Image (cartoon, rainbow, N blue to C red):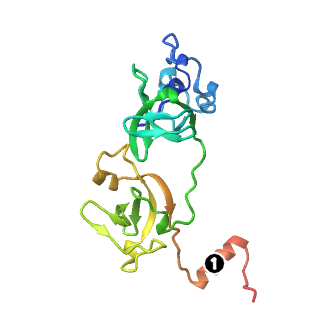
Amino acid sequence: MGVTFKEYAWLINPNLLKNSEIGGVEGCPEGYGFEEHWCDGHGMISCADCWNREISYPVIAKAVRQTEIYPTHKAMPGDEFQVCEVDMNTYTRMGVRIIVNGSKVWANHGDFRYYIDKEEKKVQKEFTKADLKDGMMCERADGKKMLWFNGEMRGIDKWCSGTQSNLTNPVSEDLSIVRVGYPDFDKHTTISHALNGEFKEILWERKQEKEISSEEAFSVLKEHYGCDVKIKE
């Protein structure tokens, strides 16, 4: 479940929500810097539909004070968490659900400041066995996905050992890891479904190498330079 622009406006300033406004919020998302000129290229859309769109970037909650997070967590000033759900109808001190150590927990929305993280997350170029953390999803060369736990890849009823530092497997190339990321438990409620689904976020992908003949190499170089190519000794 993502955060809508209307929910984000409520997190920033609950007074922005007004029943008298057509979309339920005063102004437009772009007017507050939430996004840039979305209406210009998307034709006619109602203000309500516009504000109820999910934000395509992560919404981050940054703690402004030390606070207890239900039921057993604690946040210190400056700690940041991803927001996964907002309850604008709450009459309690809660109102925002954040991800803490992989768990979704409710917290007091007033203990945080919020921003949209538009930084592009780049796929990590190099990845070793030491970079693997419990809960990450690994895709093998044979296409099978498994979760990484306690130093090994583990599935529903099977496990895979022998992963080397460079994420290859000496037993079979099919068992080598070619992609690492996180499972999408927002879409899938069970591990088996998540392992059959797509990655929520990809952290690393193995670059595929292709062997070609010298004739093919010269053909590629000729096409690139527009003339015959001679290798200089």
Q: Where 177 sits versus 24, above or below?
A: below
Estimate how packed mark 1 is, as few (under 14), some (14 to 19) or many (20 or more) residues with alpha carbons within 10 Å.
Answer: some
User: Which residue does the image show at 43% across and 35% down from the upper left?
Assistant: 69
How many marks the image carries: the answer is 1
What residue is disc 1 on?
Answer: 219
Q: Nearer the viewer, residue 187 or 133?
A: 133
Quadrant showing the C terminus: bottom right
Q: List x then y, in percent, for residue 115.
A: 58, 35
Q: Residue furthest right?
A: 232
Q: List x then y, in percent, for residue 30.
A: 62, 28
Q: Nearer the viewer, residue 37 or 61?
A: 61
Whether residue 29 appears in this view of the structure is yes
Q: Where 21 sits versus 12, above or below?
A: above
Query: For residue 97, what is the image quadrant?
Result: top left
Say left or right for 203 vs 170. right
Say left or right for 166 vs 198. right
Q: List x then y, in percent, for residue 40.
A: 62, 30
Whether residue 58 appears in this view of the structure is no
Q: Where 18 sits versus 125, above or below?
A: above
Query: Regarding mark 1 in the picture, which secondary structure is present there?
Result: helix
Q: Residue furthest top?
A: 20
User: Which residue does the image show at 40% across and 58% down from the upper left?
Assistant: 134
Quadrant showing the N terminus: top left
Q: Residue furthest bottom?
A: 233
Q: List x then y, in percent, for residue 79.
A: 54, 41
Q: Nearer the viewer, residue 233 or 86?
A: 86
The amino acid pointed to by label 1 is Ser
